[in-house]
């Protein structure tokens, strides 16, 4: 192919040269000399000499009007060069920031999962309405030593669904005490799935019970959340009077006696209600409150409130602040996103906008009660009906038919709970 290309190129050059010679000869025969003589008689040589002195050899006049026009053209060319240079510099800066963020993955814990072992219900893969969405599981782990693998319960469970066409993001909390299949055909509080089998089992649990197609996750420990919020300069939270006591108690309990030095540095009591800036430890303690009206439902709402406050703060943060935030948080994060997947998320990050949040099971379809050895649980009055509502929330499916798997899990939950 390369040889053929060169031969074709040579042929084209030869044809071009022959055509050029023929054209010049034709011009000469057809009166080029006459035109030149006429030009000479009409002052061609004078104009040519004048143009030559002014830097032009194409016969253009160097009069005041043309000088003005050329000045405008020079300015326009200069302006275009400046604009292009600016665009190139912005593009380089953006590219540099993205590549830098991807390279930061070297400090992220990589707890890989075998995607072949992640369960996705059969009918879900053919669900056209779910195409064009990236669904990611977010886990907040009850771990103070950055051990983000199995053996630790997931204090926070969220699903972020990103519409890749519009950049709209919807976030749904899955209440950690929800009674459902743990991904291994055993039934209990859903936060036990992460403790039993790490992120792989926790993702399968979400897919099996909710007819989702999640394969990616991000987990973060307490230290990570504290450092993120501190790096951002705190977050604005409207603290209620009845939350103050519990917020301060959780602060005091979050670190063991071996870390009293940090406790002394970070532990600042909240003394009044109202909108105020909470530091990392205060905001993390706020996320954990469940002893007020609303229990676990209000607790999950607080977690979403803090997450949205962090996102809002990050949007307006400087590059140096975001750099410090990433440096502080990534050692406390685990994910199975590879560089390419991370890049695909980062490149559109500025266009993402959280448009809706909610909790599963939905308020109209849940109760609380004790379920055997599992104890006090959040009970979906119908897991099947809740899955219909979830697909309407995430994917705008007005009429969704749950998979046979979900229907069987729903029947089991109803049998165990009497709901």
Image (tube, rainbow, N blue to C red):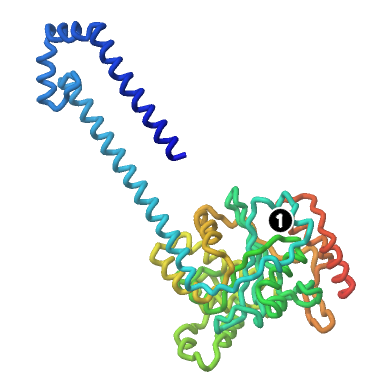
Q: Is residue 23 left or right of residue 97?
A: left
**Residue at screen point 72% across, 50% down:** 129
Q: Check the image and report above or below for 30 versus 87.
A: above
- The image position of residue 262, as x and y in percent, is 47, 86
Pick the front one: 187 or 10 = 10
Pick the front one: 103 or 360 = 103
Please identify the quarter of the rendering in which residue 245 is found.
bottom right
**Residue at screen point 49% across, 87% down:** 263
Q: Is residue 348 left or right of residue 403?
A: left
Q: Residue furthest bottom?
A: 257
Q: Is residue 323 left or right of residue 207?
A: left
Q: Quadrant of the C terminus?
A: bottom right
Residue 295 in view, yes or no:
no
Residue 338 in view, yes or no:
yes
Pick the front one: 140 or 299 = 140
- The image position of residue 148, as x and y in percent, is 59, 78
């Amino acid at each position: 192919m390369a040889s053929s290309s060169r031969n074709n190129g040579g042929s084209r050059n030869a044809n071009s040269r022959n055509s050029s010679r023929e054209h010049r000869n034709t011009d000469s025969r057809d009166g080029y000399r006459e035109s030149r003589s006429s030009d000479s008689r009409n002052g061609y040589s004078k104009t040519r000499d004048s143009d030559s002195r002014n830097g032009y050899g194409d016969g253009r006049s160097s009069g005041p009007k043309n000088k003005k026009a050329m000045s405008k053209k020079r300015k326009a060319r200069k302006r275009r060069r400046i604009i292009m240079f600016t665009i190139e510099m912005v593009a380089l800066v953006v590219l540099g920031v993205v590549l830098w963020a991807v390279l930061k993955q070297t400090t992220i814990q990589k707890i890989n999962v075998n995607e072949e072992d992640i369960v996705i219900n059969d009918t879900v893969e053919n669900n056209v309405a779910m195409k064009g969405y990236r669904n990611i599981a977010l886990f907040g782990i009850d771990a103070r030593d950055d051990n983000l693998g199995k053996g630790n319960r997931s204090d926070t469970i969220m699903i972020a669904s990103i519409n890749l066409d519009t950049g709209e993001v919807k976030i749904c909390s899955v209440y950690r005490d929800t009674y459902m299949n743990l991904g291994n055909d055993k039934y209990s509080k859903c936060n036990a799935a992460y403790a039993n089998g790490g992120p792989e089992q926790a993702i399968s649990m979400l897919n099996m019970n909710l007819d989702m197609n999640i394969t990616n996750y991000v987990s973060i420990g307490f230290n990570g959340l504290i450092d993120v919020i501190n790096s951002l300069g705190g977050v604005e939270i409207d603290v209620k009077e009845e939350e103050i006591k519990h917020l301060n108690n959780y602060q005091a309990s979050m670190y063991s006696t071996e870390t009293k030095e940090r406790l002394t540095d970070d532990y600042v009591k909240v003394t009044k209600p109202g909108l105020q800036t909470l530091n990392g430890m205060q905001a993390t303690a706020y996320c954990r409150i469940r002893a007020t009206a609303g229990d676990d439902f209000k607790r999950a709402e607080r977690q979403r409130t803090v997450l949205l406050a962090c996102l809002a703060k990050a949007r307006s943060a400087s590059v140096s602040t975001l750099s410090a935030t990433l440096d502080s948080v990534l050692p406390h994060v685990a994910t199975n996103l590879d560089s390419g997947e991370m890049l695909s998320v980062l490149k559109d990050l500025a266009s993402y906008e959280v448009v809706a949040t909610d909790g599963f099971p939905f308020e109209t379809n849940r109760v609380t009660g004790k379920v055997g050895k599992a104890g006090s649980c959040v009970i979906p009055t119908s897991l099947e009906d809740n899955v219909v509502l979830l697909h309407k929330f995430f994917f705008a499916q007005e009429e969704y038919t749950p998979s046979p798997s979900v229907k069987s899990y729903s029947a089991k939950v109803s049998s165990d709970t009497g709901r």
